[in-house]
Image (cartoon, helix red, strand yellow):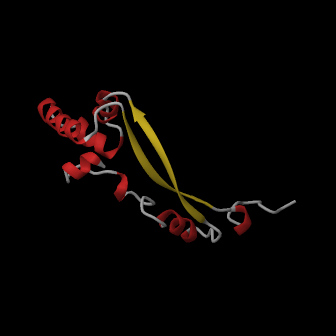
Amino acid sequence: MLISSMVPSARDESDFPGAGEGELVDIFHKAGISDAEGEALTFEVEHASFEEWWEPFTLGVGPAGRYVAHLDPESQASLAEMCREELPPPPFTMSFAVWAARGSARSHGLVPGAGET
């Protein structure tokens, strides 16, 4: 999200279906899984260096990475420097939250043969 906050044309995962609070549960409900429950999962990733954090973007990982990978080398270097200025000195830890959902397709007859003996 750091890159997309600095460069609005660089998309991130926040536009993906299920990326917002409650959206995965809604998707499950629309699929007929009425007992769906959602929760936030949080985790942290420690980066020993800025380069360790930056490299996946240069390889095109994720929407922001696709944006970075298509930049010319000068623009990549400029964006990398902007990011370096925004991040704390290494080593640094990044915290993330993702949405998860669970429910039972079997209990709702959505799995062929479920419940047959």
Q: Quadrant of the C terminus?
A: bottom right
Q: Residue at x 70, y 68 (%)?
A: 108
Which one is in front, 91 or 107? 91
Where on the picture, by quarter, is residue 90? Answer: top left
Looking at this view, is 59 or 91 the one in front?
Answer: 91
Q: Is residue 5 left or right of residue 17?
A: left
Q: Position of residue 4 (x, y in %)?
A: 25, 50
Q: x, y (%) of residue 43?
A: 49, 45
Q: Residue furthest left?
A: 74
**Residue 106 quadrant:** bottom right
Give the residue drawn at x 77%, y 60%: 113
| Residue 64, x across and y down, in percent | 29, 44
- Reply above or below: 76 against 2: above
- Residue lying at the far right of the rendered structure: 117
Residue 28: x and y, percent?
A: 56, 65
- Left or right placement of residue 104 versus residue 52 in this view: right
Horizontal side of residue 95 vs 79, given as left or right: right
Left of 82 or right of it: where is 58? Answer: right
Residue drawn where x is 45% and y is 52% of the image:
97
Say if 11 sits above or below 36 in the image: above
**Which residue is located at x 44 percent, y 38 percent?**
45
